[in-house]
């Protein structure tokens, strides 16, 4: 069976797009629990915390609009951790 390069390329694009969309749709503030100690103390953030912050960056605007989460995400401790992890903040 002969498969054209274009067909293979299109399948790859569709698969990669699906993976990206499904990852972008996973906004779960509980994934930030590795950052809790750093948000509330002077402890530096762990590498897991920084990884999770980077993964959740697309969700920050939603967290800021949600009264249940906004006080945590916009707190001075959270801002310190976000800066330490070099996470780019989106413009909301």
Image (cartoon, grey):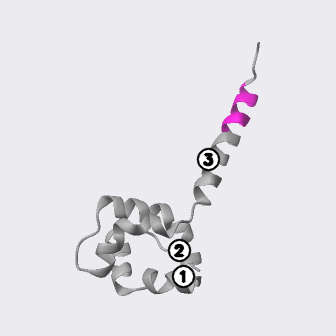
Which residue carries the number 3 mark?
Answer: 19
* Residue at the outermost top position: 1
Mark 2 crowdedness (10 Å alpha carbons): few <14, some 14-19, many ≥20 = many
Which residue carries the number 1 mark?
Answer: 64
* Relative height, residue 64 to residue 82 (above, below): below
* Residue at the outermost left position: 43
* Quadrant in which residue 5 is drawn: top right
Q: Residue at x 46, y 70 (%)?
A: 88
Task: Pick the quarter of the image with the N terminus.
Answer: top right
Residues at circles 1 and 2 in contact by the CB criterion of under 8 Å:
yes
The CA span between labels 1 and 2 is 6 Å
Magenta highlight: main SS = helix
Task: Pick the quarter of the image with the C terminus.
Answer: bottom right
Q: Which residues lie in the magenta part?
A: 5-12
Residues at circles 3 and 2 in contact by the CB criterion of under 8 Å:
no
Is 57 magenta? The answer is: no
Q: Residue at x 70, y 42 (%)?
A: 14
The CA span between labels 1 and 3 is 26 Å
Residue 60's tag is: 2
Q: What element carries label 3?
A: helix
Mark 1 crowdedness (10 Å alpha carbons): few <14, some 14-19, many ≥20 = some
**Where residue 75 appears, x then y in whole percent?**
40, 86
């Amino acid at each position: 069976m002969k498969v054209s390069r274009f067909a293979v390329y299109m399948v790859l694009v569709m698969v990669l797009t699906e993976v990206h969309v499904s990852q972008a749709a996973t906004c779960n503030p509980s994934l930030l629990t590795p950052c809790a100690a750093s948000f509330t103390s002077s402890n530096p953030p762990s590498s897991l915390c920084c990884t999770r912050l980077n993964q959740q960056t697309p969700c920050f605007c939603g967290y800021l609009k949600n009264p249940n989460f906004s006080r945590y995400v916009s707190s001075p401790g959270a801002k310190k951790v976000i800066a330490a992890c070099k996470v780019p903040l989106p413009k909301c």
